[in-house]
Image (cartoon, rainbow, N blue to C red):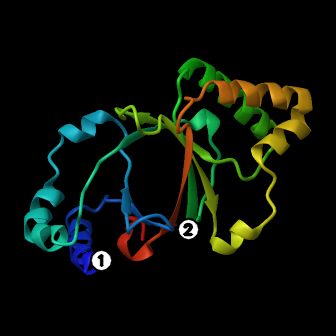
Amino acid sequence: KFREAVKPYNACIAENDAEADWSAWTNVGGEGTTYHFVSTMANWAEMDSPNEAGETCWPEHMDKIMAHVDSVSTSFARPMADWSGDAEGYNVVRLHQFRVKNGSDFREAVGEITSIMKEAEYEHLGDWYNMIGNSSNEQDYFVVTHFDNFAAMDEDRAGAYTVVKEQAGEERADELWDDFSDALKDDWEYFTLLLRRDPELSHSSEE
């Protein structure tokens, strides 16, 4: 019922905003069903501009959508291009999320790890993000690994440690992984989330 309520709202947004783009994802496993609607902004200033499409469409569809919603939350994250790859065309993602106690040590370790992986031309390099305005019990950083589909998860991919060890040597790999681990919080420092794309609820202005 939630999906059927969202579809006409999405159609209304697309009709009233020719540049609207978003991707929709839903959880695989875990408790209940969670939908993630992901869009991008060039800068914070975009939030000062009137959201005419939303103001037009939301009042008409709000009651039908919210009747099937338990809770809503909004998060902001900044992409970290220097650490990230250039994946395209994926339909399954795993988010590796980290709570950090020493940001400078974490950034130094991850910066060198990803630099080495780029030197090795590792084709599965993920996309890194820095959370903005998160609470103390939420992730500080996360990296998204991409898969074309679920079958791609059966492939025997080399992990980050293996790539770094082969490129920089086992001693350097061990040093970096120790630095990385030491920078994380001691409780609940790492958790993952597996999501699948929902093409019916996603929209691209180019299509």
Q: Residue 137: x percent and y percent?
A: 41, 36
Indicate the quadrant where residue 45 lies. top left
Label 1 and label 2: CA atoms lie apart by: 18 Å
Residue depicted at x 30% and y 47%: 74
Q: Residues within 10 Å of mark 1 (few under 14, many from 20)?
A: few
Q: Where 195 sits versus 99, above or below?
A: below
Asked whether residue 108 is in view, the answer is: yes
> Going from the N terminus, do you reach mark 1 or mark 2 first?
1
Nearer the observer: mark 1 or 2; the answer is 1
Image-quadrant location for residue 120? top right
**Which numbered marker is on residue 25?**
none
Residue at mark 2? 91
Taking depth in this image into account, of 125 and 96 the one nearest to the observer is 96
The answer to whether the residue labelled 1 contacts the one labelled 2, judged by CB atoms less than 8 Å apart, is: no
Q: Say which of 96 and 123 sits in front.
A: 96
- Quadrant where the C terminus is found in the figure: bottom left
Residue shown at 59% from the left, 64% from the top: 90
Q: Position of residue 121 (x, y in %)?
A: 80, 44
One can see residue 120 in this view:
no
Count neighbours of disc 2 (C-alpha within 10 A) and say few if under 14, some if 14 to 19, many if 20 or more: some
Pick the residue in front: 20 or 33. Answer: 33
Is residue 150 toward the left or the right of residue 10 in the image?
right
Q: Which residue is mark 1?
A: 3
Q: Amino acid at mark 2?
A: Asn
